[in-house]
Image (cartoon, grey):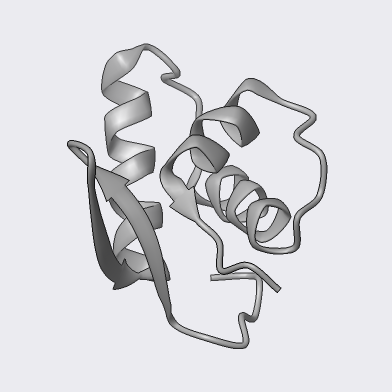
Amino acid sequence: MRKDFEFEIITITVKDEEVGCSVRSYVKAKTKDLVEYGYSSLTEEEVIDSVWKAVNKEAPTTIIDHFVQGDIILQED
């Protein structure tokens, strides 16, 4: 993975439940799901960029950013 994270585990929502998973596992699964959904040219690099934006609380600029930000649960400061 291109981006370095300060942590390897993120909290996501899966079927309305909070679940901890590795960033690597999330990126692989999310990429696979979105490719199957119709984003056939999507790469793991694009998804990791979206994860990076989400965990750094950057504004979404793509539809992939919105999908990822909808999954990730951030801790309040």
Residue at point 72%, 53% (across, down): 53
User: Along the horizontal axis of the image, is 48 left or right of 21?
Assistant: right
As rendered, which of 51 and 31 lies closer to the eye?
51
Q: Quadrant of residue 55?
A: bottom right
Q: Quadrant of residue 20?
A: bottom left
Above or below — where is 41 with respect to 77? above
* Side of 41 where 28 appears, left or right: left
Q: Quadrant of the C terminus?
A: bottom right
Residue at the outermost top position: 38
- Asked which quadrant contains residue 19, the reply is bottom left
Along the line of sight, the residue nearer the viewer: 57 or 62: 57
In the shown orientation, is residue 12 left or right of residue 44?
Answer: left
Residue at the image point whose x is 17% and y is 36% from the top:
15
- How far from the left and from the top, in percent, is residue 2? 63, 70
Q: Residue at x 71, y 25 (%)?
A: 62
Q: Position of residue 70 (x, y in %)?
A: 49, 35
Q: Is residue 63 left or right of residue 1?
A: right
In the picture as drawn, the residue positioned furthest to the front comes out as 76
Q: Position of residue 26 (x, y in %)?
A: 34, 57
Q: Residue at the spot x=28%, y=69% of the render?
A: 21
Residue 36 higher or lower than 60, as above or below: above
Please tell me how many numbered marks the rendered image carries: 0
